[in-house]
Amino acid sequence: MFQRTSIEGFLGRTGVAFTVFILAAFLGPQPAAAATCDSLLTLKLPDTTVTSAETVAAGAFTAPGGRGGGGGGRGPSPYADLPAFCRVALTLKPSADSDIKVEVWLPMTNWNNKFQAVGNGGWAGSISYAAMAEALRRGYATSSTDTGHTGPSASFAMGHPEKVIDFGWRSEHEMTVKAKAVINAFYGSSPKYSYFTGCSGGGRQGLMEAQRFPQDYDGIVAGAPAVNFTGRAVQAIWLAQASHMNEANYIPPAKYPAIQNAILGACDALDGVKDGVLENPRACKFDPKVLECKGADADTCLTAAQVETARKIYAPVLNSRTKREIFPGLEPTASFGTLAGAQPFGIATDLFRYVVFQDPNWDYKTLNFDSHMDLTAKLAGAHIDALDSNLKPFFDRGGKIIQYHGWSDPQIAAGSSVNYYKSVVDRLGADAVMRSHRLFMVPGMAHCGGGDGTSTFDMLTALEEWVEKGKAPDQIIASRVVSGKVERTRPLCPYPQVATYKGSGSTDDAANFTCKAP
């Protein structure tokens, strides 16, 4: 490396043009000059139209459809604290039938030199503005997509197989590639690190990215991932049939408290702490028959028919012919209301109506859990399920995954995350997986949040520490927050470890717990 004096002496003996040449050679290739926000309107990218590029002043953003993005309402804007940013809207057409809307937000100042894409839930159909706002607050350039259609139903799939592919995986990858190009054009450099975060459908999207496009991201937070999207739909129809083929089998919500009280009475103390939360629900062996009515029907008991329904809710769904497991049952503390409620689960019926059978009038009572399974896998699972256990290409390039799931999830059975994680371990080995992929099960948490457990935590910071500093998360501290007040903290442990009370001190303090194998 040259000394400063030698450089100055050398340059002093050269002309200006030669000086510029020597500096360029000495300093190496330099990033392209940064662009202005409005100039991005002329950016040319394959299969892409930039439909708008505008600077949004600090606190001035209003989401389409109202202040929260989902309708009107009074009160302060949830976006009032956003910094100024460049808002870019794109339309992507990777196929003749594609119409994928994407937004990319770029901080005007204090960019952290990183990119965070955010996922969707359900059938998507809209930009995830709230999640983008959270990424922007942290200094990220961020992006989201509507996955290729508008509206929360799957009606877009009728006669549009390319749109099913867009929803299943293509929109997220195309968004990623184009968003990175926009970032590079605006700042004159590519992001140093790229992350994907999402829960439910967004968790599925993140794992799909790792499976199909291992080069897209350095780290992924996948919460309650709908990895077995079709299996969950089959389970929902299975439970709808179990509950409504004969209405005597239906369990009304008035009976839910009696069921939960019986479960907690039988199992709450198994983890050493009686706190209304099961640290390890798999240790709870609960048979609903203990609640069978001894006399007249009442809200405090289950009829014989309802006992059988409850048993089906907790049991895995099996192929009626091969007896192969299609999807795991709900865990003991999960509510019945979503999958065994008064009406079939809409995300599930949409899959069969619009994707599999292409019939808006399809009757959920006609689904056959043998003959219709191959058709479901072919038309939907091949594009939407994210079950590929070969994450080696992602791991080999240094990619990290933090996966989490609430044990009391009433919408996507927690066992589906356990099953997927185990499939990766079975394929690649426990040591290799622990170096790159960790699953954190959250006791008492419902779907992506809520419930009776410690459901407030920061997975992204833990992921940043792992990706950027090599610090693997041996535990993640979570809180139970009620009315803005922290009532309890507890460590979340990498599966299969569970938080275990040390035997002294407050059971509401995470410091008094350690992570141990059950």
Image (cartoon, rainbow, N blue to C red):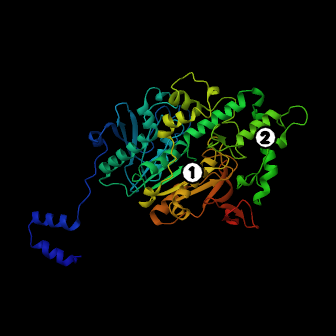
* Residue occupying image coordinates x 76% and y 32%: 252
What percent of the width, then of the height, locates residue 213? Answer: 41, 50
Front residue of 458/66: it is 458
Count numbered badges in the picture: 2
Residue 88 image position (x, y, % from top left): 36, 41
The quadrant of the picture occupied by the C terminus is: bottom right
Closer to the chain start, of discs 1 and 2, is 2
x, y (%) of residue 94?
A: 35, 37
Q: Secondary structure at mark 2?
A: helix
On the image, numbered disc 2 is attached to which residue?
257
Q: Is residue 288 left or right of residue 74?
A: right
Q: Residue furthest front?
A: 321
Q: Residues within 10 Å of mark 1 (few under 14, many from 20)?
A: some
Determine if residue 481 is in view.
yes
* Left-right relation of 446 to 85: right
Which quadrant holds residue 165? top left
Nearer the observer, 191 or 397 = 397
Q: Are marks 1 and 2 in contact (CB under 8 Å)?
A: no
Q: Amino acid at mark 1?
A: Tyr
Answer above or below: position of 450 versus 94: below
Q: Is residue 127 visible?
A: no
Q: Label 2 is placed on what type of residue?
A: Pro
Disc 2: CA contacts within 10 A as few (<14), some (14-19) or many (>=20) = few
User: Split into 4 quadrants, where in the image is the N terminus?
Assistant: bottom left
| Residue found at the far top of this picture | 361
Q: Is residue 310 left or right of residue 88?
A: right
Q: Which residue is mark 1?
A: 420
Looking at the picture, how far across and down is residue 67, in whole percent? Answer: 51, 36
Helix, strand or loop status at disc 1: helix
